[in-house]
Amino acid sequence: MSDDRTSALTSSAYQQALEVIASVEPRIADATRQELTDQRGSLKLIASENYASPAVLLTMGTWLSDKYAEGTVGHRFYAGCQNVDTVEALAAEHARELFGAPYAYAQPHSGIDANLVAFWSILAHRVETPALAKLGAKNVNELTEEDWERLRHELGNQRLLGMSLDAGGHLTHGFRPNISGKMFHQQQYGTDPETGLLDYDAVAAKAREFKPLVLVAGYSAYPRRVNFAKMREIADEVGATLMVDMAHFAGLVAGKVFTGDEDPVPHAHITTTTTHKSLRGPRGGMVLAQEEYAADVDRGCPMVLGGPLSHVMAAKAVALAEARQPSFQTYAQQVADNAKSLAEGFLTRDATLVTGGTDNHIVLLDVSSFGLTGRQAESALLDAGVVTNRNSVPQDPNGAWYTSGIRLGTPALTTRGFGHDEFDAVADLIVQVLQNTQPGTTKDGKPSKASYALGDGVADKVKGAAADLLDKHPLYPGLNLS
Ligand code: PLP
């Protein structure tokens, strides 16, 4: 379909949908319209966000949402699931083809849910199934109370090794306050204090000592690539299951920017992902697995997931079909190239970056050299229309709340068509804001980690320059709401 025809249809679809919504609750229609205006008018640099296509967005607003479909394709606990079966089977097929995965599970409602499915699948496969076989039982209902208690104890006593939060790992990778840090005995690996890079020898040494059942690789805020072949070697040496959470960089895997040792799917036993970050799909999660884990992953719903969101699985299928187009590879390469341009833009302006640069979609700016906390920098940037999020840096003296870093990502603005020059200009605007922000004080005159003062006129100047960039690369061009 031509771009003009798509734009006309999309405009009319949303115009009419908003009128229907407004007839019931106008404030929701207003907030939805306002969100489009806000997203169109701001520099979105949140590394975990993107803009899904109108086809993906429209797929979510249908009656597929009305259907309950606990279970798996062809094996549901509810009647009348034939269309959900079609949807789920297609989403899984696209995922298998796109990622070269033997098995794909499209049901997880989010990335955290995908990780929970993976954890319980690993526990089922590695602990429960062998225990049942040893006791000659088919399932847990056949166990005596005594055997069941012993098994529960064993399930609750396993070890997990993941990347620490301040090195860039995700809280579901064994961070103690998270359920993953409570359900497992956990230890964390960090990055080299000098270089900020992953040190595989140090990870191996920790794994040998700790002997985890699960080794988790993947990150939310590490601006470099990971060698998953090496992580698998480490896992194999200590008998661990390698689980890779590629939530952040799935788009770079799908777009063949990460191949060979940098592609987690052939190396990991289980790979989890979100579908809404660099992959540019609907908000949701997915699990990819080697065949030996398939049956356990299939038990995700109702083991840890509620009924699948059929409308979102449909949107996953549409997004994955988009990601199988050659244009997605061009997009993914541009995401990585743009991150390099952004990093160079900072370095030429004397800013400090964790690891000194990037080779994925993330740039992690250490704002302590500007005399600011991450919280102050995030707020000042937001005043100037630059949307980022604060983030810890390795061994962060300001902790996970105030932080010393700002995490920036290129997937969203690359979708809008930003290239090298625009990202260099973005670096310049960010440096202008940070150079003109002063840390504030508390009511009793002590240094504050939250308050700040942005120099007069800076916000307006930066907003004006950002508007020029954004106007040249409109979001959802052709989508007109009167
Ligand atoms: N895993 C990683 C690596 C993430 O970065 C995130 C989200 O930021 C998640 C999991 C959780 O995803 P969700 O918010 O969809 O649950």
Image: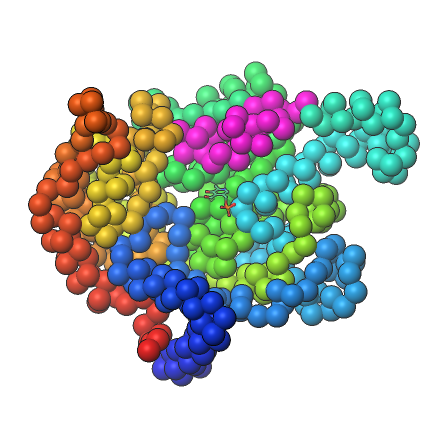
How was this image coloured? Answer: rainbow
How many labels, in total?
0
Q: Looking at this view, is 331 or 160 the one in front?
A: 160
- Outermost residue, left side: 456
Considering the image in quadrants, where does the N terminus appear?
bottom left
Q: Is residue 480 above or below residue 249?
A: below
Q: Position of residue 103 (x, y in %)?
A: 66, 52
Q: Is residue 296 above or below residue 236?
A: below
Q: Residue at x 77, y 32 (%)?
A: 128
Q: Looking at this view, is 390 or 169 the one in front?
A: 390
Q: Is residue 116 visible?
A: yes
Residue 244 image-quadrant placement: top right
Q: Looking at this view, is 63 or 200 the one in front?
A: 63
Considering the image in quadrants, where does the C terminus appear?
bottom left
In the image: residue 104, left or right of residue 43: right
Residue 266 sits inside the magenta stretch: no
Q: Residue at x 76, y 27 (%)?
A: 152
Residue 180 sits inside the magenta stretch: yes
Q: Position of residue 211 (x, y in %)?
A: 61, 21
Q: Is residue 253 above or below residue 268?
A: below
Residue 317 image-quadrant placement: bottom right
Q: Position of residue 28 (x, y in %)?
A: 44, 64
Q: Position of residue 95 (x, y in %)?
A: 58, 57
Q: Is residue 236 visible?
A: no
Q: Residue at x 71, y 44 (%)?
A: 303
Q: Residue at x 47, y 67 (%)?
A: 25
State which region is magenta.
157-186
In the image: residue 474, left or right of residue 14: left
